[in-house]
Amino acid sequence: MTTPPSTLDTLGRPVRDLRISVTDRCNFRCVYCMPKEVFGRGYRFMDRKELLSFEEIERLAGAFVVHGVEKLRITGGEPLLRRDLDVLIERLVGLGNLDVALTTNGALLPQKAGSLVAAGLERVTVSLDSLDDDTFRSMNDVGFPVTRVLDGIDAAAAAGLKVKINAVVKRGVNDDQVVALARHFQGTGHILRFIEYMDVGATNGWRLDDVVPAAEIVSLISAELPLEPAEENYRGEVARRFRYADGSGEIGVIASVTQPFCGDCTRSRISAEGRLYTCLFATKGHDLRALVRGGADDAEIHATIGRIGGRRTDRYSEERSSRTAELPRVEMSYIGG
Ligand code: SAM
Ligand code: SF4
Ligand code: SF4
């Protein structure tokens, strides 16, 4: 079969970055992502047979690679809850010439970092919103101690993984942790990135007042640990980079709410049950699992991915302020961030 060309969407954007959710389950109940009131005992998570198998994930990922995807991000829910995840990582790394990384809450890294590295994983992003134990426990809402995530970060680094740290900042909840987090990771080589709290999903009760703008985060840090802007690593990098003036490293801020970057958005997402979403705020996905399980051949899969990519018009964050009607949206734990 001839290789299809990399498809550009209606705004001239290719797809370069594919996020694959491997489970909708999580061992945390972060208040901004899976609030307990919604994701409680009665919540129906996907059955195992509904999840894409490793073979199906590998096949779809391979098709996206043909369409120009260069980065794969394994996410969830909590991806380390998926049994034998290292086997999937090994298969995806085996697709070749790809930057494969994992986004995790870090809780299971002490047990799993070694096998992930053995499978060929090189990078991990660990979500950590606070160093203060009480704040951290109340944000993850299952009372998980911060020291165990810090142990997970250490285990990942000791196993040879490059580590990034993601912190979502919510006004009045953990904005007092911004400088502490910066100090803690300064000079460690782990890049810390602050993410504006986003209005994903429909369950977290998001309000604009809860968002701490990236510019404010940078000023808070810079007042104590002087920062200067750094250049983009590549076009379309979503995190704005700042380096410490004393040369002790860098931080990033992801200003999805206050400075949206849809014009450069080259991401797509596949949910754990195989639906393709071309935007974090998409209202409905395209059922790739039905295609794969229905016996589609490679040409059909390629054509479908190309067609969906070519029709993509998403620019939700840029349009956010002009939206008045609330549309139904998928949850972050379903689509993977
Ligand atoms: N469980 C893994 C973790 O927490 O890293 C992976 C999945 S989680 C959905 C991926 C990322 O989305 C995490 O860094 C999390 O902090 C972020 N996230 C979840 N809800 C968010 C929200 N409302 N606004 C901004 N980021 C959010
Ligand atoms: Fe779980 Fe990650 Fe969502 Fe927290 S942010 S509830 S760890 S999926
Ligand atoms: Fe991309 Fe949608 Fe986010 Fe815009 S709102 S940056 S199109 S995922």
Image (cartoon, rainbow, N blue to C red):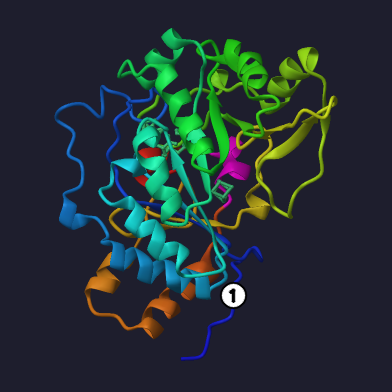
Any magenta on residue 317?
Answer: yes
From this view, report whether residue 291 is shown above or below residue 37. Answer: below
Q: Nearer the viewer, residue 71 or 287?
A: 71
Q: Nearer the viewer, residue 308 or 116?
A: 116
One can see residue 74 in this view:
no
Quarter residue 210 falls in: top right
Quarter residue 250 falls in: top right
| Dot 1: element | loop
Mark 1 packing: few (<14 Cα in 10 Å), some, or many (20+)? some
Quarter residue 37 falls in: top left
Q: Residue at x 38, y 25 (%)?
A: 30
- Give the x, y percent position of residue 280: 48, 47
One can see residue 46 in this view:
yes
From this view, report whether residue 94 is shown above or below residue 230. Answer: below
Q: Which residue is mark 1?
A: 6
* Helix, strand or loop: magenta stretch: helix
- Give the x, y percent position of residue 170: 53, 19
Q: Nearer the viewer, residue 57 or 328?
A: 57
Residue range of the region highlighted in magenta in the rendering: 315-324
Q: Is residue 37 left or right of residue 245?
A: left
- Give the x, y percent position of residue 150: 48, 24
